[in-house]
Image (spheres, helix red, strand yellow):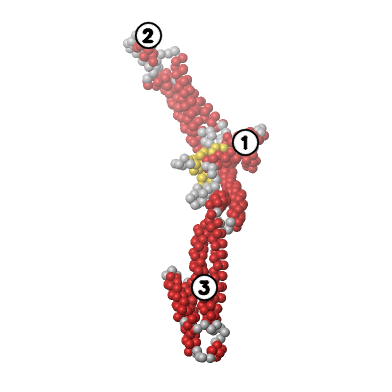
């Protein structure tokens, strides 16, 4: 049973196929040719459509990003999607259809919305990405039955993409710049307001600002030192005043008739020498701290010089009185002037001394008042520092915001200039739209091959069908399927001369028909290749 199933499942061998082809050659050739001719002819009845395309390159900015950063934040892919939606809008496509006169035959029976939908289907956009997965270029295709119209429509669409991208980028860049300009004006007004507050505070608290604390401390230290210097000078002036008043009293007593030795004698000279010693000691102390140009050093030297001159005059006056003494008191008395030169000098020095004392006291008073003033400023320094910090905090923040906005606005203005001069990221048509020579659809060469395949299937089907339906047995395998006996011998066909001649003519006719059919198929394929 298994052997019978195996024999029944066996495919015909080459000899059997050859015999079938020889016997059913017309049932194979005629469907073959008819199937191919039907498909090939139908391919020429389908209207031809032509596709024109162009390549748009995404041109990178001519100025590197590290020098001028773009103020358009969205990705180029998102920009292209937005531009595509705008161009494929109903208004834009109707404008293109009207300007180019597209779908002239369809306008009679289709609405504008149907025409727009048809054009959307005829448009194809193909993206091209680089190694970094970033959009680097894209193709625009348009399909039409007229090759020239396909080229014109593709060029119009490419120009729309390029123009729309430039206008969109310029508009967005200008909007960004204008927005930053408005924000900058608000920041400038706020900064001016904060500056006015700081200026008013400084005017109201001049000399009490935290930045002037160190200066106030230095001034206070200098005033305290000056008070000490003036106090020392005042003490010396008072001592000088006491000394001058004593000398003047002695001179006046001498002028009233005292003996020469009582005033200008050794006791008076001893007082002057004592004063000279004090002045020299004071000069030595001052020169150890100050230079010779210091006012106190120069003044002390002048006092020493005047005191020495006064001592010399007193000595000369005493000697003159001793030499001119006589028994006539009247003559001696009349020879003395009401006020001698040393007395006048002493009175002049006393006046200057009193002026100096008054001046020193006034200076000390004024300096003490200033010390109290600066001491009050230093005491108020923590409070002023807190108040000033509160004011300057807002000012510093406003200044930081203003400077940041100013830098951003300048950067945005440069980016806008790049967009206006088309030096930023833009679209550039790399290849102009081509004029299609061969139709894009249908693919007649492919249909020609498909027709040949259809013809082969039909021919084989007809030939094997006729072979099976004839009821004749032509092979040993078919006999074995009918009877369970082995074939002992085969009787070859016996043909007459007339039958042999007829078979030969039939074979020649079939061969000629096969050659003619093959020629037609080859000719049709060549025509399809050249003109399809």
Q: Which one is nearer the viewer's eye here, 68 or 214?
A: 214
Say whether marks 1 and 2 touch (CB < 8 Å). Answer: no
Residue underneath mark 2: 483
Q: Residue furthest front?
A: 327
For residue 203, say whether it is visible: yes
The disc placed on residue 177 is none
* Pointer 1 or 2: first along the chain: 1
Q: Position of residue 63 (x, y in %)?
A: 50, 52
Q: Residue furthest left?
A: 488
The disc placed on residue 116 is 1
Question: Which residue: 64% across, 41% down?
Answer: 95
Q: Residue furthest right?
A: 108
Q: Position of residue 181 (x, y in %)?
A: 60, 50
Q: Secondary structure at mark 3?
A: helix
Q: Position of residue 453 (x, y in %)?
A: 47, 27
Label 2 packing within 10 angstroms: few (<14), some (14-19), many (20+) = few
Q: Secondary structure at mark 1?
A: helix
């Amino acid at each position: 049973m298994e052997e019978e199933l195996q024999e029944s499942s066996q495919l015909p061998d080459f000899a059997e196929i050859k015999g079938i082809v020889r016997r059913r050659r017309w049932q194979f050739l005629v469907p073959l040719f008819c199937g191919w001719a039907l498909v090939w002819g139908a391919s020429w009845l389908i209207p031809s459509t032509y596709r024109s395309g162009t390549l748009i390159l995404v041109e990178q900015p001519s100025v590197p990003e590290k020098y001028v950063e773009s103020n358009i934040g969205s990705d180029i892919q998102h920009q292209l999607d937005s531009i595509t939606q705008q161009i494929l809008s109903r208004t834009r496509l109707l404008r293109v259809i009207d300007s180019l006169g597209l779908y002239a035959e369809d306008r009679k029976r289709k609405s504008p919305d149907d025409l727009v939908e048809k054009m959307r289907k005829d448009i194809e956009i193909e993206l091209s990405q680089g190694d970094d997965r970033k959009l680097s270029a894209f193709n625009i295709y348009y399909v039409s039955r007229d090759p020239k119209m396909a080229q014109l429509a593709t060029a119009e669409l490419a120009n729309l993409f390029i123009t729309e991208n430039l206008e969109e980028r310029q508009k967005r860049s200008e909007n960004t710049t204008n927005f930053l300009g408005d924000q900058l004006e608000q920041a400038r007004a706020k900064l001016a307001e904060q500056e006015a507050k700081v200026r008013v505070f400084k005017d109201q608290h001049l000399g009490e600002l935290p930045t002037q604390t160190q200066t106030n401390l230095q001034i206070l230290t200098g005033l305290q030192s000056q008070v000490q210097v003036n106090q020392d000078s005042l003490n010396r002036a008072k001592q000088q005043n006491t000394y001058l008043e004593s000398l003047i009293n002695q001179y006046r007593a001498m002028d009233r008739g005292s003996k020469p030795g009582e005033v200008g004698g050794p006791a008076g000279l001893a007082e002057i020498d004592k004063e000279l010693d004090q002045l020299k000691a004071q000069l030595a102390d001052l020169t150890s701290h100050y230079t010779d140009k210091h006012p106190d050093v120069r003044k002390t030297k002048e006092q020493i010089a005047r005191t020495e001159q006064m001592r010399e005059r007193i000595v000369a006056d005493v000697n003159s009185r001793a030499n001119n003494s006589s028994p006539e008191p009247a003559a001696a008395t009349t020879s003395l002037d009401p006020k001698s030169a040393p007395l006048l000098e002493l009175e002049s020095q006393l006046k200057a001394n009193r002026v100096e004392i008054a001046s020193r006291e006034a200076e000390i008073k004024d300096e003490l008042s200033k010390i109290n003033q600066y001491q009050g400023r230093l005491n108020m320094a923590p409070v002023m520092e807190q108040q000033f910090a509160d004011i300057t905090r807002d000012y510093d923040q406003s200044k930081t915001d203003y400077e940041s906005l100013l830098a951003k606005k300048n950067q945005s203005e440069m980016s806008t200039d790049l967009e206006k001069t088309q030096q930023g990221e833009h679209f550039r048509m790399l290849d102009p739209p081509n004029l299609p020579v061969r139709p894009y659809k249908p693919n007649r060469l492919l249909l020609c091959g498909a027709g040949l395949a259809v013809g082969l299937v039909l021919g084989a089907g007809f030939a094997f069908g006729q072979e099976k339906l004839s009821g004749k047995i032509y092979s040993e395998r078919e006999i074995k399927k009918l009877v369970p006996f082995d074939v002992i011998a085969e009787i070859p066909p016996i043909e007459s001369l007339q039958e042999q001649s007829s078979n030969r003519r039939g074979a020649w006719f079939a061969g000629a028909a096969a050659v003619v059919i093959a020629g037609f198929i080859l000719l049709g394929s060549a025509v399809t290749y050249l003109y399809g």
